Amino acid sequence: MREIMYPFTASKLKESNKNSIKDFVSAAGIFGVSHMMMFTQSEHANYMRIVKNPKGPTLTFKINEYSLAKDIVKFVQDNKKQSKIFSSTLQSAPLLIMNGFQSRAEDDPMKIASLMIQSMFPPIKV
């Protein structure tokens, strides 16, 4: 996920079992981190949380399916024709187009989610 979100990520951040979420939240302000994406695993499912620093909101998504990076690399190597497409995919910053999420209600969860995801990325300068 760090490679996908590059350059908007702490690619060299090292975590340990001693670190807690409070450690990362307290350090986020010092380094100017506006959003944090966390992945957790429980007995029932895997989850992705997106946290807006410093005071929220926090969005939680249940992960239904995922693929490991090594599986994608193996797939690309097995399909030589598609390897040219995937080899250049991670060379540029992600482009996020949030369209069709307009809502009339101020407290609509879709509106909150779309605004939060939009604010994770700088606006595009056309």
Image (cartoon, helix red, strand yellow):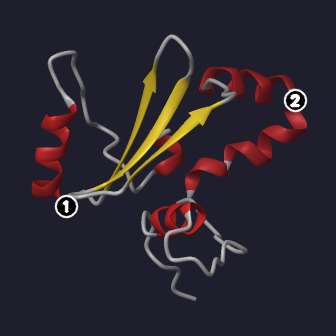
Q: Amino acid at mark 1?
A: Gly
Q: Secondary structure at mark 1?
A: loop
Task: Tell me what residue is drawn at x 21 percent, y 15 percent.
Answer: 17
Instruction: Estimate how packed mark 2 is, as few (under 14), some (14 to 19) or many (20 or more) residues with alpha carbons within 10 Å.
Output: few
- The reply, left or right, for residue 72 in relation to residue 120 is right
- In the rendered structure, find residue 79 and report the number of the disc placed on it: 2
Q: State which quarter of the image contains the C terminus.
A: bottom right
Asked if the residue at tag 2 contacts the one at tag 1, i.e. Cβ–Cβ closer than 8 Å, the answer is no
Q: Nearer the viewer, residue 38 or 1?
A: 38
Q: Which residue is mark 1?
A: 32
Q: State how far apart marks 1 and 2 are (Cα).
A: 41 Å
Earlier sequence position, callout 1 versus callout 2 = 1
Tag 2, which secondary structure? Answer: loop
Kindly indicate the quadrant of the structure image that contains residue 56. bottom left
Work out whether 40 lies above or below 34.
Answer: above
Between residues 117 and 126, which one lies in front from this camera angle?
117
Q: 2 left or right of 24?
A: right
Q: Hey, what amino acid is under mark 2?
A: Asn
Identify the residue shown where x is 24% and y is 28%.
14
At 66% across and 78% down in the image, what residue appears? 102
In this view, the residue in front, 28 or 40, is 40
In the rendering, at what x and y percent does residue 92 appear?
56, 59
